[in-house]
Image (cartoon, helix red, strand yellow):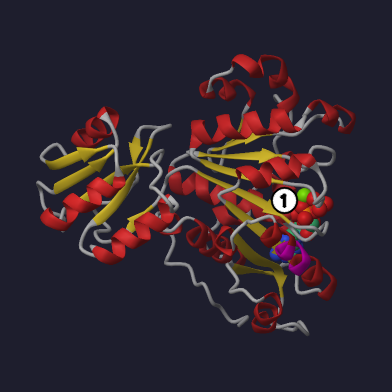
Amino acid sequence: MMNDSPLVLIAGDAHTEKAVSARWPKARIGGSFRDLSLLEYVASGIRPDIVVVDVSLSPRGETLEAWVSRFKAAYPSSTVSMLDGSSNRISQDVSEVPGQTTVLGSQTVVIWSPKGGVGKTFLSTNLACAASLASGGNAVLLDMDLCSGDVAVHLDLFDGPTITDLIPVLPDMRSEGLDKYTRRHGPSGLNVICGPRQPELSDLVTPEVVKSVLALASKRWGLTYVDTPPDMASDVVGECVDAATKIVLVTTQDVASLKQCRSAMDIFAKLGIPGSAMAVVVNRASKDSLMPLQKVEEFLGVELAGAVPEDRKAAERSVFEGRPLSLISKNEISEAVWGILDHLSPGLGRTTPKKKTPRRRGFFW
Ligand SMILES: Nc1ncnc2c1ncn2[C@@H]1O[C@H](COP(=O)(O)OP(=O)(O)OP(=O)(O)O)[C@@H](O)[C@H]1O
Ligand SMILES: [Mg+2]
């Protein structure tokens, strides 16, 4: 059990201090800094029980995720917790999971593949719903497959605003203004910004619009998921990739899909996107495939972030009902999705009580 009056170090501002006092009224504040290096220096002397970091802070020369991992390695007995500025909430369960890192800060996860029909929309809707459940509704899914997006179909969201409706008011919009243009997926509480009603309206959604909406969305909800078209040359995909903290590359075990996945990874590497920003997921995984998952990893030269099994009947039914399988506990696809969520956002996939810790490696490997 965590100490009743834990020693807390804060990296943030007055809002962070207020949130810490609300969360741990008896906390002993060891110091409050705007600079992570300074916090690290002080931590070496006082060994805090908890470190609370405002997610909008950027450490010098590394990502916040890398800083947290390094800090955790140096001070394993300290719990590192994040303050999500958009909701002003400290990451959940921190007192129940001492010594764990629960990063519920700002993340933009772009689900993409150069190949059509591999399950981008299926995966993005499932992942985003799981993230919404785990974060208490602090997640949004944007349908950036502007010509033929079917996020609304997968989530059974008919009627309501779309991204084209917000364009006239975008220049003066604050992040809360997005609420009016967002649909709510009832079963998961996920916020959804749907694509244009007709494909011919897609031209209105310029790369500049995409950039602004992505920036506002990540400020408003913290956890942003983006479904995309299978088009590498599109400027819209370019904007999504630029905004991504993680790119989820979806492939199947099919050789053509794997070859395209490898070329895409090469291109991303040439664009200077580090391997750590990419996560490869095999969808429709089958143990009968001529390319077992271990061979897929060898071929792509990466460790997979996860493999979602093929289950045509369950997938078809879930799309028909607009209820992603990640909302159901006893299902292989659901387990795989929660495992991927935990891989992408360490700690998040463990926050739902009905779940046991998801298996990263199942019977496919
Ligand atoms: N793991 C799975 N098992 C069985 N069927 C699946 C699985 N994942 C997706 N599907 C089915 O495959 C079809 C294509 O999925 P989806 O629409 O998500 O692909 P996509 O990559 O988004 O396609 P597009 O490139 O056209 O946008 C859907 O009918 C979906 O139900
Ligand atoms: Mg799609």
Q: Is residue 356 above or below residue 154?
A: below
Q: Quadrant of the C terminus?
A: bottom right
**Dot 1 corresponds to which residue?**
121
- Residues 88 and 92: in front is 88
Residue 212 x, y percent position in the rendering: 63, 29
- Residues 294 and 58: in front is 58
Splitting the image into 4 quarters, where does residue 347 fall? bottom left
Splitting the image into 4 quarters, where does residue 76 fall? bottom left
Q: Quadrant of the N terminus?
A: bottom left
Locate ligand 1 by image quadrant: bottom right
Assess whether residue 103 is covered by the magenta stretch: no
Name the residue rendered at 62%, 73% in the picture.
302
Q: Could you tell whether 328 is left or right of 147 in the image?
A: left
Determine the secondary structure under disc 1.
Answer: helix
Name the residue rendered at 75%, 24% in the picture.
164
Q: Is residue 288 visible?
A: yes
Name the residue rendered at 81%, 25% in the picture.
204
Q: Could you tell whether 49 is left or right of 87 in the image?
A: left
Q: Could you tell whether 177 is left or right of 262 in the image?
A: left
Splitting the image into 4 quarters, where does residue 33 fall? top left
Q: Could you tell whether 27 is left or right of 72 in the image?
A: left
The answer to whether the residue bearing label 1 lies less than 8 angstroms from the nearest atom of ligand 2 is: yes
- Residues 309 and 8: in front is 8
Residue 45 x, y percent position in the rendering: 12, 55
Q: Circle 1: is it few (<14), some (14-19), or many (20+) Cα within 10 Å?
A: many
Q: What amino acid is at disc 1? A: Thr
Residue 364 x, y percent position in the rendering: 63, 80
Number of labels in the image equals: 1
Q: Is residue 216 above or below residue 318?
A: above
Magenta highlight range: 262-266
Name the residue rendered at 85%, 27% in the picture.
201
